[in-house]
Image (cartoon, rainbow, N blue to C red):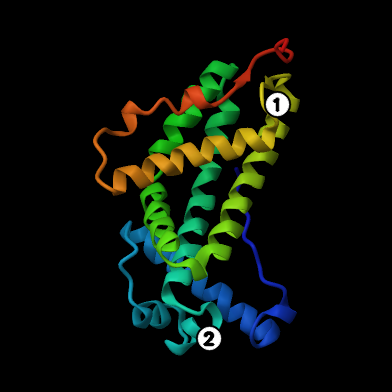
Amino acid sequence: MSAERSVTPAAATPGGERGRATRNRLIATAARLCSERRSMDLSVAEIAREAGVFPNQVTYHFGSKDSLLLQAAFLVLLHETRRVERIGRRAPDAAAFRRNVSRAVLALPSLPLVAKALATGIAKPELAPVVEQHLNLLFRQSERFLGQLLDSRGWTAERPLGEEARTFWSTALGAALLSRAGADGTADDLDLAGVLSVHDGPALAG
């Protein structure tokens, strides 16, 4: 679950290396502003001003402000998962791991930001590739983290780790989307820990 920034190859980035540097600066700036304000309500002008670029660079490199903010929200989430990993590594057993990691994820300040970004992405089909790329990045990182942890602890999971990571995050993000849509209930009502199949000892007999 550790943060990992996806970087567009220079050949595919407008302006090559220089364009990639501007693109990365815009993402980092938007992520910082989203994190500081706990809000996605940012204008193109203020993002560009903070990044030290012209406003038209946003559309030049990202196509739209929504695409930039979606990527920025995921960058904040990926950064915050470092804390989740540290909590997971400190768990004395698999039951504590399931419980502690689930609580930590539901308390992440970035979860509502990503829910808002996903809601925007769902409403705009042109953002579907961006949503898919960043969700897959999140899933892969979580799968890698789980694999390393299980190997070091001798724990096992009842599902393939890729499925485990996808199911866990789909549930957490789905709950955040429902909450944003005004559904009744709170994070305390969600048994996210029950979604995880990680347990102590060898794999259970099928």
Give the residue at mark 2.
60
The residue at which mark 1 appears reads as: 150
> Looking at the rendering, in which quadrant would you find the N terminus?
top right
Q: Residue at x 41, y 47 (%)?
A: 111
Report x, y in % for residue 76.
47, 56
Q: In the image, what residue type sits under mark 2? A: Tyr
Name the one closer to the observer, 159 or 30: 159
Judge whether residue 2 can be spotted in this image. yes
Secondary structure, mark 1, is helix
Residue 189 in picture, x, y percent from top left: 32, 27
Q: Secondary structure at mark 2?
A: helix
Residue 33 at what x, y percent from top left? 38, 66
Sequence-wise, the earlier of marks 1 and 2 is: 2
Quadrant position of residue 146: top right
Q: Residue at x 39, y 57 (%)?
A: 119
Left or right of 126, for residue 120? left
Residue at 70% across, 79% down: 12
